[in-house]
Amino acid sequence: MSEDKSAPHVDARSPWVLDTRELGRRAGLSRPVQRDVEVTKPLGVPDVIVVPEGAKVELDLLLESVVEGVLVTGGAVAPVSGHCARCLDPITDEVEVELTELYAYPDSTTEETTDEDEVMRLVDDRIDLEPVVRDAVVLALPLAPLCTEDCAGLCSECGVKWADLEPGHGHETIDPRWAALVERFDENPASGPDKQA
């Protein structure tokens, strides 16, 4: 019995899995695929920015039969939510990614001459889009998401958003060497201009 070099079995019921049998193995045949797929686990960095659980990823793809396998091209769009890296306000947006991935036929030259992690494989004439879409979406998410490009963040002294503060907002800083003298004057308000001798 020969060793099975293909990837693990794919779940044909998964909405991420596409059947390519109708393409056959004749190079030049193609078919479009459009579908919305629900995310079952958040994609991204928790507490920073993610495609949340339950969100729909919109897929708009073209499957093309080529000599070495099935070429998948197109795009995916997904909603994202997170927090601004500067002011911590909630963010909602969307991420859009372009996809180009070859799924190699079993026993093709590509399949035989590449490592398992270098190219995707067809398994039972099916392709699993989830790893490709997941990786593309996660890589496209910003490392430091911002609510606006010019977000000024928070005041380092009081923690209030700069956008909510009055112009000229600031905090008086006292040189520690003079701090004792300032405290002394604060305790002795006896020498004010209105004070009579």
Image (spheres, helix red, strand yellow):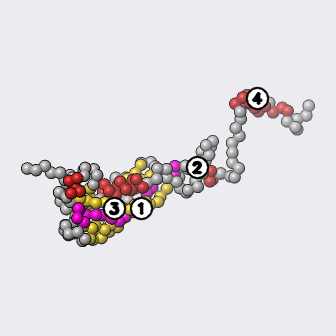
The magenta stretch spans which residues? 66-85
- Which residue is denoted by mark 3 in the rendering? 100
The amino acid marked with disc number 4 is: Leu
Expressed as whole percent of the image width and height from the top left, the position of residue 184 reads 76, 29
Residue at the spot 37% in from the left edge and 64% down from the top edge: 75
Whole-Å distance between the Cαs marked 1 and 2? 26 Å
| Callout in the foreground (3, 1) | 3
Whole-Å distance between the Cαs marked 4 and 2? 34 Å
- State whether the magenta stretch is mostly helix, strand or loop: strand
The amino acid marked with disc number 3 is: Thr
> How dense is the environment of label 4, judged by Cα within 10 Å: few (below 14), some, or many (20 and up)?
few
Mark 4 in CB contact with mark 2 (< 8 angstroms):
no
> How dense is the environment of label 3, judged by Cα within 10 Å: few (below 14), some, or many (20 and up)?
few
Describe the element under mark 1 as helix, strand or loop.
Answer: strand
Expressed as whole percent of the image width and height from the top left, the position of residue 121 reads 23, 56
Question: What residue occupies the far left of the structure in this picture?
Answer: 1
- Which residue is denoted by mark 4 in the rendering? 181
Q: Earlier in the sequence, mark 4 or mark 2?
A: 2
Expressed as whole percent of the image width and height from the top left, the position of residue 24 reads 19, 68
